[in-house]
């Protein structure tokens, strides 16, 4: 499982010009599912997302998590995190999980994030989404459950 986590002041996700999800201060999380990923990978990613200390304290140090800050999460499925460009210039997505299995794990992880106490807004799986975000920092963290 590959996850890109970005700290934002705000973010909005649209599909076909319609606002689907919107958050204020929080995290935009791009969530990619690879072949063979299982629920335990989701559990690991959820624990990392919820407890990742990327919000600044009074001294400007990143000491606070999304949970402690009551930050919102915009959770977006993104199979392109498995794009392989090692051969040629067009990405191969052969390492990405099949859509049915990826959707199941995406929804599973979203439910687990909610169970952890986070407010989670989602994209629409498989849709052509437009995401507008005001990055804070910028702070971007990449997490891979297999590394």
Image (cartoon, grey):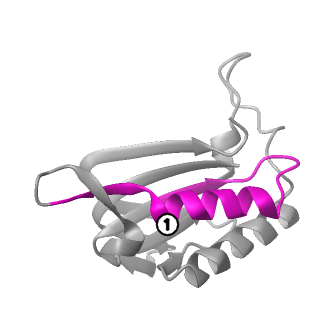
Q: Quadrant of residue 109?
A: bottom right
Label 1 residue SS = helix
Q: Is residue 142 above or below residue 42?
A: above
Q: Measured from the top left, where is residue 14 in percent x and y?
A: 46, 73
Q: Measured from the top left, where is residue 92 in percent x and y?
A: 76, 32
Q: Is residue 47 above or below residue 91?
A: below
Q: Quadrant of residue 43?
A: bottom right
Residue 38 magenta-highlighted = yes
Stretch of the chain drawn in magenta: 29-57
* Horizontal relation, residue 7 to residue 98: left or right: left
Q: Which residue is mark 1?
A: 50
Give the residue drawn at x 44%, y 44%. Answer: 141
Residue 41 magenta-highlighted = yes
Q: Measured from the top left, where is residue 111 in percent x and y?
A: 66, 80
Give the residue drawn at x 70%, y 40%. Answer: 82
* Horizontal relation, residue 52 to residue 57: left or right: right
- The reply to whether residue 77 is visible in this rendering is no
Mark 1 surroundings: few (<14), some (14-19) or many (≥20) residues within 10 A: many
């Amino acid at each position: 499982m590959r996850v890109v986590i970005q700290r934002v002041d705000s973010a909005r996700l649209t599909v076909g010009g319609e606002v689907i999800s919107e958050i204020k201060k929080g995290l935009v999380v791009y969530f990619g599912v690879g072949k063979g990923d299982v629920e335990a990978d989701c559990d690991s990613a959820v624990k990392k997302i919820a407890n990742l200390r990327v919000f600044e304290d009074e001294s400007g140090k990143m000491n606070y998590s999304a949970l402690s800050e009551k930050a919102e999460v915009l959770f977006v499925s993104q199979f392109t995190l498995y794009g392989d460009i090692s051969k040629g210039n067009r990405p191969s997505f052969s390492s990405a999980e099949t859509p049915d299995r990826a959707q199941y794990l995406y929804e599973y992880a979203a439910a687990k994030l909610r169970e952890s106490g986070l407010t989670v807004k989602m994209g629409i799986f498989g849709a052509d989404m437009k995401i507008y975000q005001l990055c804070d920092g910028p702070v971007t963290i990449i997490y891979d459950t297999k590394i």
